[in-house]
Amino acid sequence: MAKPMEEIKWQELEPGAVVREVGNAREYETGTWRSEKPVVNADECIHCGVCWLFCPDAAIHQMPDGHFEANLTYCKGCGICARECPVGCITMVAEEEE
Amino acid sequence: MGVRKGIEVSLAISEAVAQCNVDLIAAYPITPQTHIVEHLSEIVANGELDAEFVPVESEHSAMSVCCGSAAVGARTFTSTSSQGLALMSEIFIIASAMRLPVVMALANRSLSSPLSIWNDHTDTMLVRDAGWIQVFIENGQEAYDHMPWAFRVAEDPDVLLPVAVNIDGFILTHMIEPVEYIEDSVIKKYLPEFKYPIALHPDNPLSMGCFAMPELYTEAQKARDNAVVNSYSTIVKAWKEWEQLTGRSYHPIETYRADDADYCIVTMGSYGETAMEVVDMLREEGEKVGAVKIRLWRPFPFDDFYKAVLGKNHLVVIDRAISFGGPGGPVASELRSALYSKQGAPKVINYVAGLAGRDVSRHDFKNILLDAKEKVQRGEMEGYTLYGLRG
């Protein structure tokens, strides 16, 4: 967004609060919701992409060596990737208190 | 001027909508609205109107189709009633939030249960706070006139809001009345081409109805309220333009023989005509009575209302819906609230009458006025009275 949402005045909203800026959902960092994070064992990953396919937030990306990792800025820690991984190489690990 | 026809009001509404050259009609039949959409489907099927008629499977779908249609900048019409309005209420509210200028003929009918198909205002009060522009009309000519008017207001770049024209079910929809038709060329002049500034188009991508955090929701609601309030000037301007073309004038609040009236009957919709009749009748008997008719319900025309009633003594407000466990009928509650801090505010005596089509004649209006005078003498003006209740 052009400016942080907590600074936008009501007069500055488009009619119907339409959004013309493409892809600004990326500014909403849903990773803060997470209580568990997926940890991938890259040596066991078979590069099938099932986790990438199932991730409801499109938060999983393929790394240069071919294995998949979650982007923790957006991953909500739902655990679907760990549940669906056919070789069980993803483990959900509790986030530690800061 | 145009041709006068004796016609069922529902059919006159359909033909006015067709004259507005709508692009899309999506509707599901429900009594007493059925004749409106049935006749429109005939007009489209006969090739007299180049429009999409979408025979949806429910009212929820009807309003969803209407939203999609308006979102691409198509002139869009629907019509419903009662349970149909209740079913579409989820999307009905979204249409105004997303500033989609859909026009609806709302054939007012009671809500179940007990199941009833007859006329009152309980359906429209369900969506009172939905952010639509809402007007009430009194006869067939007004129903016809308010179709071009509704599109003219809804699609104005300064407004961009949906408009519901409230038409008393059966009492108006099924009456055969003389209606003066306005020539297509006049309507074309009155109603410019719809150019929707936030239309969905691949060349100019945008997202509608997005998610907002608590940091933005309040601002979005304020912007929405501001849009409804600001629509007032266009509403009045569109009535004035219509008057210049047809000679028929409309105002947010209309009064009848009210200048020196001690008691004013306040109505919305078709009861306004009965009120004028009873005022004439009682004036002949020497009673100082008048009528105040609320035409524009949202945005509520506070200044016009104050101008009409401040300095008067008594308002006898006839509601056609109940707020269960609430302070009175919805109209009287709002009027009492509007008058609370005003100098010279009249006393409000509230009656709920004519629920589910129970007939309310001039005689009944006279009884209501007599009862109101007794209540004033006894100082019992709070709450409301269900007129004609047995037991």
Image (cartoon, rainbow, N blue to C red):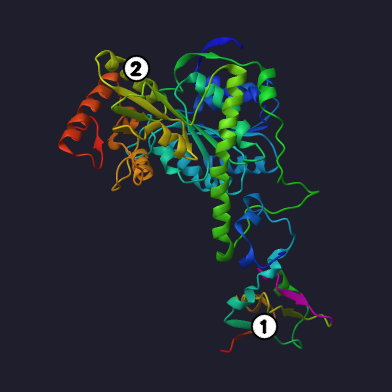
Residue B320 point in image, percent of width and height: 35, 34
Residue B171 point in image, percent of width and height: 40, 23
Q: Amino acid at mark 1?
A: Gly
**Element marked by disc 2:** helix
Residue B372 point in image, percent of width and height: 22, 31
- Would residue B315 appear left or right of B239 to someone viewing this image? left
Q: Amino acid at mark 2?
A: Glu
- Would residue B367 appear left or right of B310 to someone viewing this image? left
- Pointers 2 and 1 in contact (CB under 8 A)? no
Identify the magenta region: A54-64
Tell me, yes or no, whether the highlighted magenta stretch contains residue B15. no
Say if B243 sits above or below A39 in the image.
Answer: above
**Is residue B169 shown to the viewer in this render?**
no
Quarter of the image that includes the N terminus of chain A = bottom right
Which residue is identified by label 1?
Answer: A88
Q: Which mark is drawn over residue B277?
A: 2
